[in-house]
Amino acid sequence: MMYRLDTNQQQKLNCALFYLKVKELKNLCQRYSIEPHGEKIDLIKNIYQFVTTGKPTIAPVIPNISKAKKNILYSLNLETLILYGNFKNDLKTRIFFKSLIGNHFHYTAFGIDWIKKNWFAGTPPTYGEFAIYWQKEHTHRTSSN
């Protein structure tokens, strides 16, 4: 049964969903047969869309070109593609990025989101491209404050 929500109710629903924990959001997804894919923001969007339209979202798919191939060793260098299934947020990779960017490098949500956006678009970036992007975005964000 679909309920029609007015604009005010939709805004309240959207705000209320942010107060829920990921586990609670996943339980809501399960209750309404919504595919619980993605991170917290994705779960919120999926629930909101379902409640307001009656239609579930379709989980995005990372194309094969953005995925690492099994049994291949990918080295850490400027030209190596950052591929889904191979990229690691580990000390070795962090040290590599610090050697490219500087000691101020740290993993950020904007950086990880950029990598994921490129994966879904079928244009996985190289480690060098990520270093350039991260430094530009970091400079922009620190100069804006």
Image: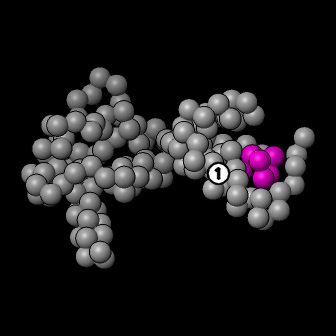
Q: Residue 85 location in percent, x, y?
A: 36, 33
Q: Is residue 10 magenta?
A: no
Q: Residue 74 location in percent, x, y?
A: 23, 35
Q: Residue 96 location in percent, x, y?
A: 13, 45
- Give the side of residue 132 with respect to residue 100, left or right: right
Judged from this view, the residue extending furthest toward the right is 1
Q: Quick check: 136 above or below 25?
A: below
- Give the side of residue 21 with respect to residue 65, left or right: right
Residue in view at x 34 percent, y 40 percent: 83
Judged from this view, the residue extending furthest toward the bottom is 144
In the rendered image, which residue does mark 1 sit on?
A: 16
Residue in view at x 22 percent, y 57 percent: 131
- Give the side of residue 51 with respect to residue 103, left or right: right
Residue 80, by quadrant, is: top left
Residue in view at x 78 percent, y 53 percent: 52
In what quadrant of the picture does the C terminus appear?
A: bottom left
Q: Residue 93 location in percent, x, y?
A: 19, 41
Q: Which one is nearer the viewer's eye here, 80 or 4?
A: 4
In what quadrant of the picture does the N terminus appear?
A: top right
Q: Which residues are magenta?
A: 49-54
Judged from this view, the residue extending furthest toward the top is 71
Q: Is residue 52 magenta?
A: yes
Asked whether residue 65 appears in the rendered view, the answer is: yes
Q: Which one is nearer the viewer's eye here, 116 or 5?
A: 5
Residue in view at x 75 percent, y 46 percent: 50
The number of numbered badges drawn on the structure is 1
Residue type marked 1:
Ala
Prevalent SS, magenta region:
helix
- Estimate how packed mark 1 is, as few (under 14), some (14 to 19) or many (20 or more) residues with alpha carbons within 10 Å: few
